Structure formats: structure tokens, C-alpha cells
Image (cartoon, rainbow, N blue to C red):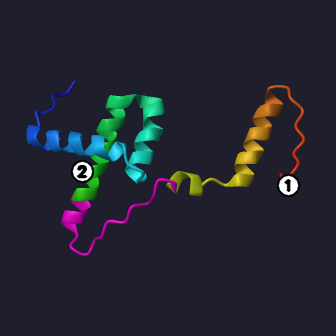
Amino acid sequence: MGKTGEGNRYLKRVLSDTAGAAAKTDTFLGACYRRLIKRTGKMKALVAIERSILVVVWHLLNDPNARFVDLGADFYERRIDEDRRTRDLVLQLKALGHEVTLRPAA
């Protein structure tokens, strides 16, 4: 196994504080945190958000013309294809042995 460096403890402190605050917001990063926490746990999700913040800051500092635009907390929900999701759920129910009849909601 390779050995990792100690890193900048001051940067780590600022990133962890920022990620903790971002996780509580109704933004894209907050939504990412809430999605990740289900699979990875709190600490790994926070580290992932820290890395995302670091990447955003690097791009903003590296390109003087870059502007930050938050994708929004509903970014993932807007990308869902409803027909595909419906088809997948029906197939899952059929695989479990259920008979499925769909009616549009009034």
C-alpha cells in the first residue's frame, strides 16, 4: 500500500466546516450529501462533499471567466424519465409475482 501525505490541516478544517454547512442547505451539494449518506455513511459522504467543493473552487480559481451556478436541489429528480421509471417498477413487481394494471391518476 502507498503512503499518503498528511495534507494541509488548515484546508481540511475549512473544507470540513464548509461541507458540514453545505450538507444542511437546500442546494445541489446538500442533495448530493443526502443521496450519498444512504449508501456510504456520514463521514464518507462529508468527504465526498469536501472534494466536490474543492473541485468547484479549483475551477473557479483556474478560469477567470467561470461563474458558479448551483444546479439546484431537485437536479436528480428533474432528470428522471417517468416512462422508464414506470416500466422498471412494473417489471420489478412482475418479477416478484404480482399482476400489474396501471390507470392514470385523475
User: Which element type, helix, strand or loop, lies under badge 1?
Assistant: loop
At mark 2, the secondary structure is helix
What's the residue at 79%, 39% (across, down)?
90
Q: Is residue 71 left or right of residue 88?
A: left
Q: What residue is at 16 percent from the left and 40 percent from the top?
A: 12
Q: Where, by quadrant of the figure, is residue 61 drawn?
A: bottom left
Three-letter residue code for mark 2: Leu
Residue 8 in sight in this render = no
What residue range appears in magenta? Answer: 58-74
Quarter of the C terminus within the rendering:
bottom right
Secondary structure predominantly adopted by residues drawn in magenta: loop
Direction from residue 5 to residue 20 in the image, left or right: right
What mark, if any, has residue 21 been given in the picture? none
Mark 1 or 2, nearer chain start: 2
In the image, 4 versus 103, the foreground residue is 103
Label of residue 54 in the image: 2
**Which residue type does callout 1 highlight?**
Ala
Q: Left or right? Give the position of 26 relative to 81.
A: left
Residue 84: x and y in percent read 72, 50
Residue 64 lies, in percent from the top left, at 21, 73
User: Would you say residue 49 is visible in this rendering?
Assistant: yes
Query: x and y percent of residue 28 in the render?
Result: 42, 53
Mark 1 — residue? 106
Of tags 1 and 2, which is closer to the observer?
1
Measured in 3D between alpha carbons, the distance from the residue under mark 1 to the one under mark 2, in whole angstroms, is: 47 Å
Q: Is residue 65 magenta?
A: yes
Specify whether residue 68 is painted magenta.
yes
Which residue is at a point 32% across and 65% down the rendered structure image?
A: 68
Compared across the picture, whether 106 is left or right of 17 comes to right
